[in-house]
Image: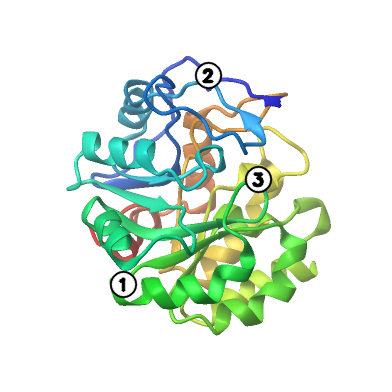
C-alpha cells in the first residue's frame, strides 16, 4: 500500500486573503480512523487529516465555505465526509459523494438532506464507481439537481467528451482535467477539456498543482489556468485539495496555492467570481 506524506504542520501565510464567503471547493477529511476506518479496496494509505487541522488552514486563507469531496480510500461509505459537513454546518458546507447503482432513491434523498450536491467518478485513484455507470447514475441524480464530478486523466478526455455532453446533468471536471503541462495547451486532452467547457454546462476545478510537470512552485500551470478562466469565467471554481493525498515526495504549501490563484486571477472581481460567486451557484449556497 502506498504511504502518503501528511499535510504541512504550519499555518499558511498567503500574500492576500480570500474575500468573505470564499469557498474551498475540493478537499478531503480522513479519520479519525477508529470511527471511520479506511476501505479495504483503497490504493493508498493517507495519514489522518482531521477537522481542526483543516479549519486552521482555512481560517488562515480566509475560507468561509467548504465542499468535502469523498476520497477513493472510503469507497462508497460516505460517513466521514457527511460527518464533516454536519460539523462544519450545512449553512456553509456541501459534500460530493461517491455512490453506485446500489443506492436507491431513498438513500440518495438522505444524502441530499445531509448536504450532498454531486457524485464523483474517479478514474484515476481506483476503488471508485465504474465509468460504465455514468449515464445511469446521471439520470438518477438529475431530479435532485445534482452534478456529476469527474476525476480523469487528460488522455481520457477526448473519448469521454461526447458521453459527458450527452448527460442530463452538469459536469464538474476535477484537477484541471488531469492534463500534463509538459504536453502543452494544444494537447488533445486539454483541447477536449476546452470543448467540454464550451458546452456551457460544464465546470472545472482550478486545483492545478497535480497537472504540473515541473513541480513546486508550479509556474508551468499558469497558461492552462488562464485559458480555462478565459473559456469559462463563470464556471471555474478553486480548491486546495487539502491534505493533498497520495503524495510521497513533496507537499504543497496551502498559502502558496492561494497565491498561485492570485497570479492566475489578478483582479479582485475575478477572484471573487472564482471563490464566492461561482461556488454559490454550483453548490447552492
Q: Position of residue 24 (x, y in %)?
A: 38, 44
Q: Nearer the viewer, residue 67 or 36?
A: 36
Q: Nearer the viewer, residue 198 or 14?
A: 198
Residue depth check, mark 2 versus mark 3: number of the one nearer the observer? 3
Q: Is residue 42 above or below residue 103?
A: above
Q: Residue at x 47, y 70 (%)?
A: 137
Q: Is residue 134 above or below residue 113?
A: below
CA gap between label 2 and label 3 equals: 22 Å
Q: Secondary structure beneath disc 1?
A: loop
Tell me where residue 29 sits by quadrant.
top left
CA gap between label 1 and label 3 equals: 26 Å
Q: Earlier in the sequence, mark 1 or mark 3?
A: 3
Residue 176 is at least partly visible in this image: yes
Say which mark, if any, is on residue 8. Answer: 2
Direction from residue 280 to residue 169 in the image, left or right? right
Q: Position of residue 9 (x, y in %)?
A: 48, 14
Q: Earlier in the sequence, mark 2 or mark 3?
A: 2
Q: Residue at x 41, y 28 (%)?
A: 36
Tell me where residue 34 sits by quadrant.
top left
Q: Residue furthest right?
A: 183
CA gap between label 2 and label 1 equals: 36 Å
Q: Residue at x 31, y 42 (%)?
A: 82
Residue depth check, mark 2 versus mark 1: number of the one nearer the observer? 1
Q: Residue at x 35, y 32 (%)?
A: 58
Q: Secondary structure beneath disc 2?
A: loop
Identify the residue position indicated by label 1 in the image: 145
Direction from residue 32 to residue 243 in the image, left or right? right
Residue 185 is at least partly visible in this image: no
Identify the residue position indicated by label 3 in the image: 125
Amino acid at each position: 500500500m502506498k504511504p502518503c506524506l501528511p499535510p504541512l504542520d504550519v499555518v499558511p501565510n498567503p500574500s492576500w486573503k480570500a474575500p468573505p464567503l470564499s469557498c474551498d471547493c475540493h478537499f478531503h477529511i480522513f479519520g479519525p480512523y477508529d470511527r471511520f476506518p479506511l476501505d479495504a479496496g483503497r490504493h493508498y494509505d493517507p495519514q489522518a487529516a482531521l477537522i481542526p487541522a483543516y479549519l486552521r488552514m482555512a481560517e488562515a486563507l480566509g475560507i468561509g465555505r467548504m465542499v468535502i469531496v469523498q476520497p477513493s480510500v472510503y469507497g462508497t461509505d460516505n460517513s466521514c465526509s457527511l460527518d464533516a459537513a454536519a460539523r462544519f454546518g450545512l449553512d456553509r458546507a456541501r459534500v460530493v459523494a461517491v455512490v453506485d447503482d446500489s443506492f436507491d432513491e431513498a438513500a440518495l434523498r438522505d444524502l441530499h438532506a445531509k448536504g450532498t450536491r454531486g457524485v464523483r467518478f474517479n478514474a484515476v485513484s481506483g476503488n471508485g464507481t465504474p465509468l460504465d455507470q455514468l449515464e445511469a447514475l446521471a439520470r438518477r441524480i438529475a431530479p435532485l439537481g445534482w452534478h456529476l464530478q469527474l476525476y480523469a486523466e487528460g488522455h481520457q478526455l477526448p473519448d469521454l467528451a461526447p458521453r459527458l455532453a450527452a448527460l442530463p446533468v452538469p459536469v464538474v471536471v476535477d484537477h484541471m482535467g488531469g492534463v500534463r503541462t509538459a504536453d502543452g495547451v494544444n494537447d488533445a486532452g486539454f483541447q477536449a477539456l476546452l470543448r467540454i467547457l464550451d458546452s456551457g454546462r460544464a465546470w472545472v476545478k482550478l486545483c492545478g498543482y497535480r497537472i504540473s510537470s515541473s513541480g513546486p512552485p508550479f509556474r508551468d500551470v499558469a497558461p492552462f489556468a488562464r485559458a480555462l478562466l478565459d473559456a469559462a469565467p463563470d464556471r471555474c471554481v478553486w480548491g486546495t485539495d487539502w491534505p493533498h493525498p497520495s503524495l510521497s515526495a513533496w507537499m504543497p504549501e496551502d498559502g502558496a496555492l492561494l497565491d498561485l490563484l492570485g497570479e492566475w486571477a489578478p483582479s479582485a472581481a475575478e477572484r471573487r467570481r472564482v471563490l464566492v460567486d461561482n461556488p454559490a451557484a454550483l453548490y447552492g449556497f
